[in-house]
Amino acid sequence: MKHSTAVLVAGMSVAAVGVAQLVQKHRHHKQDIDTALSRFQIEWLTRASSDPLEATFWAPEGVDPAKYQQMLSGNRSFCQLSLRYRLGLVSRRQLAMYGDKLMATDTCRAYWERFGSYREAEAGSRVERQFTQAMKDAYLRATTLAA
């Protein structure tokens, strides 16, 4: 191999490693932001699901604030599972199992019945759509078996 070819190959290797590091750094930064935003949302859901005044303020028209508190508690469970899935800590098989466990509760089913279509419309990324579809499928399994 010529000296110039070896230098070119070495330079391309260094550049490839640099690009890979930049991609990894960008992915990690996105995960950090996603985690921070999810933490804020989960903290608010915790507060609103335990504070009757907060629930009264945020409850949609026609929804009893006490019932809304229960729904927010269910939403908190979905948000926690969604974050774990987006970070790659839950496999698709596990997601289906956890979805079934959540939908076995009245609280989570009530939340999904009322707000599931909103979550479907809101899901942007492929991973968010996969999560939402898995929860929708779990809801359908739970409600079909209960009928």
Image (cartoon, rainbow, N blue to C red):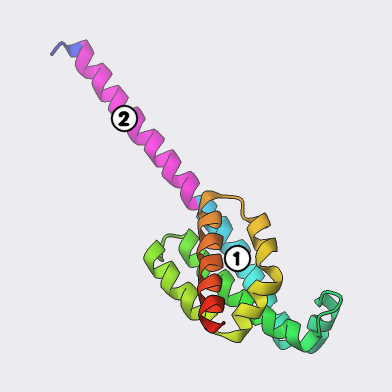
Query: Label 1, label 2: how many angstroms apart (C-alpha)?
Result: 36 Å
What main secondary structure does the magenta stretch of the protein show?
helix
Counting from the top left corner in percent of width and height, residue 58 is at 81, 75
Asked if the stretch drawn in magenta spans residue 8, the answer is yes
SS at mark 1 in the image: helix
Counting from the top left corner in percent of width and height, residue 109 is at 61, 78
What span is in magenta? Answer: 4-28
- Foreground: 147 or 36? 147
Q: Which residue is mark 2?
A: 14
- Foreground: 10 or 83? 83
Give the class, few, some or many, for how many residues have Cα within 10 Å of label 2's Cα (few <14, many ≥20): few
Give the class, few, some or many, for how many residues have Cα within 10 Å of label 1's Cα (few <14, many ≥20): some
Quarter of the C terminus within the rendering: bottom right
SS at mark 2 in the image: helix
- Foreground: 33 or 71? 71
In the rendered structure, which amino acid carries the disc numbered 2? Val
Counting from the top left corner in percent of width and height, residue 106 is at 61, 85
Q: Which residue is mark 1?
A: 38
- Of mark 1 and mark 2, the one earlier in the sequence is 2
Image side of residue 9 versus residue 39, left or right: left
Residue 142 in sight here:
yes
